[in-house]
Amino acid sequence: RQQEKIRNFSIIAHIDHGKSTLADRILEYTGALSDREMQDQFLDSMDLERERGITIKLQSVRLPYKAKNGQEYILNLIDTPGHVDFTYEVSRSLAACEGALLVVDAAQGVEAQTMANVYLALDNDLEILPVINKIDLPSADPERVRQEIEDLIGLDASDAVLASAKSGIGIEDILEQVVAQVPAPSGDPEAPLKAMIYDSLYDAYKGVITYIRVVDGSIKKGQKVRMMATGKEFEVTEVGVFAPRPLARDELSVGEVGFMVASIKNVKDTRVGDTITDAKRPADAALAGYRRINPMVFCGMYPVDSSDYDDLREALEKLELNDASLRFEPETSGALGFGFRCGFLGLLHMEIIQERIEREFDIPLITTAPSVVYKVYKTDGEVMSIENPTHMPPSQKIDYVEEPYVKASIMVPNDYVGTVMELCQTKRGDYVDMRYLDANRVNVVYQLPLAEIVYDFFDQLKSGTKGYASFDYEMIGYKASKLVKMDILLNGESVDALSFIVHQDKAYHRGRLFVEKLKELIPRQMFEVPIQATIGNKVVARETIRAQRKNVLAKCYGGDISRKRKLLEKQKEGKKRMKAVGNVEVPQEAFMAVLQMD
Ligand code: GTP
């Protein structure tokens, strides 16, 4: 049976350990891409991904492989995103597989993300095949890394392939192991259809293209299907596989990986992790593991030029077509005017969306500092979710506030343990555990408020450890904290877009630093501008921006006109990212300054 010749697998790795390079080598080796088609890192297809060297959107590819035993196999390689913001998506694409290649850098060894990915693979009962990559490096120490994989992960690494994705060493061995050790898909071809959605993509011509793994039964053109989470029904207009270009097929049968098109208008109807079933003969229960994922980080996005408001809405609507986890709704700020409150899976997700709006849609933005979602328990019994610090009720109406916490694992050479612990303490961390991984590496575990990670935790960790620390985290829920809202007044006017929520013990310090920073960032105006930080009605810090002495243009008085024009041009350029708040011009950086406070 065909099912027995299918092998569905992913590649998991810490960032930079060579996942994409290995995927390319595998594509090349199996002849899936002709030389002419071969472009560097085929699986990472978005420009932004390529620039940042990370994988955002998952993709998959079907590879024919003739094994040494003379048999033809179908290998489906499913790519996974490489960032903690997208953990849920990683877990679903792993759920579409029976096996995973665990790529570990032969010089770096096991890192925090390696562990996190291994846990996800184990949760999904995958057969894990370790691959020690980059053995061509002079600093490679494959035997040490083999031992590390055994000690830290508890996997038998005696058969781990020693590979160099760069030089194409070990590729055949890897594919042979996939064939021999990854189990064939076990679904029932006669059972009612169950297919799991592991990604989707909006196409202007076809509507939503849904990436699926058929778990039971089969799916064909013309079939009426139902999405089990939403109950919505669609008629399948096309199914096919990625070879690696999309290739239409009559049907996808049990165990196969491919795509479905069904005149679906909105990616929100194709939720990652949801089960597609037959509308006439539905399955009893959906596949396990589906979750509705909610945005973790919110910020305000405002057009610099308020006449761009409608364009910004359109841009967000377009991006949303392709991004089921992006959320936005209109928001009005006294300081910034009309804009949108946007929700993201994490900071990277947020940066990607901002960059795309500015690059692809050419709309200059003012974005406010990202905020997590606070739970506010009011004295009258009401519980509020606060995504925008401005909406925090007055303190006398608050019983207590909870904030989201994460469990962070940090792997670091033992010389830096002190630095890491100190950093975690300043970030209000609660110590959980510390374990020696080997003679000179330590795994430090802390519970930390997500808000502190949203601030510059990662940058500080990197710089404090000279780049040696690796870091991963998972959400663990909400905990009560003593939090207060800090308001900022410019020229006596409260600026809603500058408000932030801060822990009581840090409030004075942060208020002081923020006000100083604003003084640096806000250019002098024609008049004196006092800046105040307040909690409730109490002023906790104050600075004054002195008035500008004379008009810059005065310098040009009597000078030649072209020079004057140039100067005006330059000022306009600089003003692009300025927003008039009352009668004070505030630059973009001021709204983000709260992120760099410690
Ligand atoms: P993300 O997509 O960011 O998760 O990274 P990745 O794991 O896909 O790593 P990628 O394939 O982009 O490789 C990271 C870097 O390591 C690149 O500069 C590669 O050229 C390099 N690299 C990958 N494999 C090898 C190898 O076998 N030997 C050497 N020397 N370098 C390699």
Image (spheres, rainbow, N blue to C red):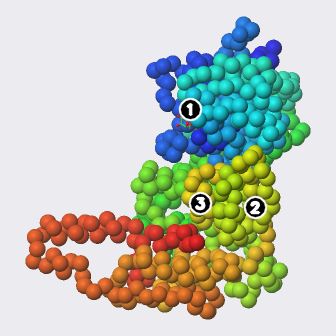
- Amino acid of disc 3: Gly
Query: Residue at the location (61% across, 18% down)?
Result: 30
Q: Looking at the image, is mark 3 or mark 2 earlier in the sequence? A: 2
Tell me the quarter of the image containing the N terminus: top right
Q: Is residue 436 above or below residue 285?
A: below
Whole-Å distance between the Cαs marked 2 and 1? 35 Å
Q: Looking at the image, is mark 1 or mark 3 earlier in the sequence? A: 1
User: Percent x, y for residue 286?
Assistant: 84, 41
Query: Residue at the location (64% across, 48% down)?
Result: 83
Tell me the quarter of the image containing the C terminus: bottom right
User: Percent x, y for residue 119?
Assistant: 79, 43
Q: Is residue 421 above or below residue 335?
A: above
- Amino acid of disc 2: Tyr
Q: Foreground residue, 435 or 582?
A: 435
Q: Foreground residue, 269 or 470?
A: 470
> Secondary structure beneath disc 3?
helix
Q: Foreground residue, 377 or 103?
A: 103
Identify the image quadrant of residue 307: bottom left
- Amino acid of disc 1: Pro
Q: Foreground residue, 312 or 520?
A: 520
Q: How many marks?
A: 3
Whole-Å distance between the Cαs marked 1 and 3? 27 Å
Kindly identify which residue carries mark 3: 464
User: Percent x, y for residue 440?
Assistant: 71, 48
Horizontally, is 469 left or right of 254 in the view? left
Q: Residue furthest top?
A: 70
Query: Residue at the location (24% across, 82% down)?
Result: 551
Kindly identify which residue carries mark 1: 138
Kindly identify which residue carries mark 2: 446
> Secondary structure beneath disc 2?
strand
Whole-Å distance between the Cαs marked 3 and 2? 17 Å
